[in-house]
Image (spheres, rainbow, N blue to C red):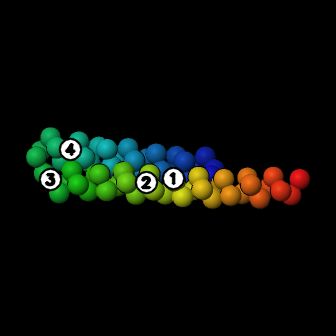
């Protein structure tokens, strides 16, 4: 995973946290839930990229 992908995922996660906080502050359950969903999506994408990176590392280790 390159730095650009990591930054994009962190930005999406931060946006989700902000949206969740606004939803809780305004007592808007839908906005809060949307924020939580945005965070989950960002975390899931990051996890997938980590798995892909780990697979590439294993592949590279066997090539040596």
Query: Marks 3 and 1: CB-CB under 8 Å?
Result: no
Position of 63 compared to 52: left or right?
right
Q: Is residue 8 above or below residue 25?
A: below
Disc nearest the viewer among 2 and 4: 2
Whole-percent x and y of residue 13?
40, 47
Q: Which mark sits nearer the N-terminus, 1 or 4?
A: 4
Which secondary structure lies at badge 1? helix
Q: Which mark sits nearer the N-terminus, 2 or 4?
A: 4
Q: Furthest residue to the left?
A: 27
Which secondary structure lies at badge 4? helix
**Cα separation between marks 1 and 2:** 6 Å
| Residue that carries the numbered disc 1 in the rendered image | 46
Image-quadrant location for residue 58: bottom right
Which secondary structure lies at badge 2? helix
| Residue that carries the numbered disc 2 in the rendered image | 42
Q: Residue at x 63, y 59 (%)?
A: 52
| Residue that carries the numbered disc 3 in the rendered image | 29
| Residue that carries the numbered disc 4 in the rendered image | 22
**Cα separation between marks 3 and 1:** 26 Å
Whole-percent x and y of residue 63?
86, 58
Q: Residue at x 43, y 54 (%)?
A: 42
Which secondary structure lies at badge 3? helix
Q: Which mark sits nearer the N-terminus, 3 or 4?
A: 4
Q: Which mark sits nearer the N-terminus, 3 or 2?
A: 3
**Cα separation between marks 2 and 4:** 18 Å
Query: Marks 3 and 4: CB-CB under 8 Å?
Result: no
Residues packed near mark 3 inside 10 Å, few (<14), some (14 to 19) or many (20 plus): some
């Amino acid at each position: 995973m390159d730095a650009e992908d990591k930054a994009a995922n962190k930005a999406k996660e931060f946006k989700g946290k902000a949206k969740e906080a606004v939803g809780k502050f305004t007592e808007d359950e839908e906005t809060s839930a949307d924020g939580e969903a945005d965070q989950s999506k960002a975390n899931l994408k990051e996890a997938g990229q980590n798995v892909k990176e780990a697979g590439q590392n294993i592949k590279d280790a066997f090539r040596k």
